[in-house]
Amino acid sequence: MKTFLIRSSLALAMTVPSLAVQAQNPPLKTVQLSAGTHLIKAEVAATEDQREQGLMYRDSMAVNGGMLFVFGASATQCMWMKNTALPLSVAFLDASGRIVNIEDMQPQTLDSHCSTRLVPVRYALEMNLGWFRLRNIKPGMAIGNLPLPK
């Protein structure tokens, strides 16, 4: 009986933190974006808290799923991978949706991955690592159906 209680307690202790993390990072409102002929279902991180949380504590993402970060003003923007287990590629987009640059990011790092300082950006689109390269999507191309910043 004692062994059963210990195992049950350990199982519960291991489950509770993951439930708490899921509650901290619920899915956000989504939009359907286009990249050439490719469709993307992107969660929209439009508030400071949502952008700070990003894809932290997620362990998977759909093949054509992503997260769109909407910034209040066009500027140089930087991303990091704190508490993010997924390797990602991020495309930085100007206000018209044109890709300024694309950076690959490794999981669980605090390295800064920034937009080029030559063109201010209004959006960042995170996708699974290599998603843009595999679809031959490059800087200068546009992402369509972007929501207007508030």
Image (cartoon, rainbow, N blue to C red):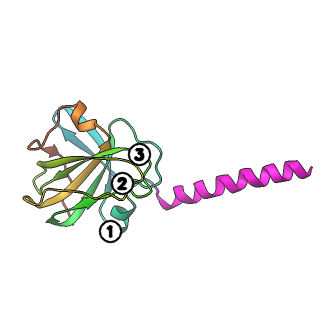
User: Which mark lies nearer to you, 1 or 2?
Assistant: 1
Question: For mark 3, what is the residue?
Answer: 86
Horizontal arrangement in the rendering, residue 1 relative to residue 56 (left or right): right
Q: CA distance from mark 3 to mark 2?
A: 20 Å
Q: Determine whether label 1 and label 3 are within 8 Å by CB.
A: no
How many badges with numbers are in the image?
3
Q: CA distance from mark 1 to mark 3?
A: 21 Å
Instruction: Please tell me whether mark 3 sits on a helix, a strand or a loop.
Output: loop
Tell me the magenta residue range: 1-26
Q: Percent x, y for residue 19?
A: 59, 55
Looking at the rendered structure, the kind of residue marked 3 is Leu
Q: CA distance from mark 1 to mark 2?
A: 15 Å
Q: Which residue corresponds to the image point at 36% horizontal and 59% vertical from the top-left?
A: 110
Q: Earlier in the sequence, mark 1 or mark 2?
A: 2
Q: Which mark is residue 111?
A: none
Residue 10 belongs to the span the image colors magenta:
yes
Looking at the rendered structure, the kind of residue marked 2 is Lys
User: Which mark lies nearer to you, 3 or 2?
Assistant: 3
Question: For mark 1, what is the residue?
Answer: 48
**Crowd tier of the residue under label 1, counting other residues whose Cα lies within 10 Å: few below 14, some 14–19, many 20 or above:** few
Can you say which quadrant of the picture contains the C terminus?
A: bottom left
Q: Earlier in the sequence, mark 1 or mark 3?
A: 1
Q: Which residue corresponds to the image point at 40% horizontal and 58% vertical from the top-left?
A: 82
Instruction: Please tell me whether mark 2 sits on a helix, a strand or a loop.
Output: loop
Question: For mark 2, what is the residue?
Answer: 29
Q: Percent x, y for residue 34?
A: 20, 40
Horizontal arrangement in the rendering, residue 125 relative to residue 52 (left or right): left
Instruction: Please tell me whether mark 1 sits on a helix, a strand or a loop.
Output: helix
Query: Which one is in front, 77 or 74?
Result: 77
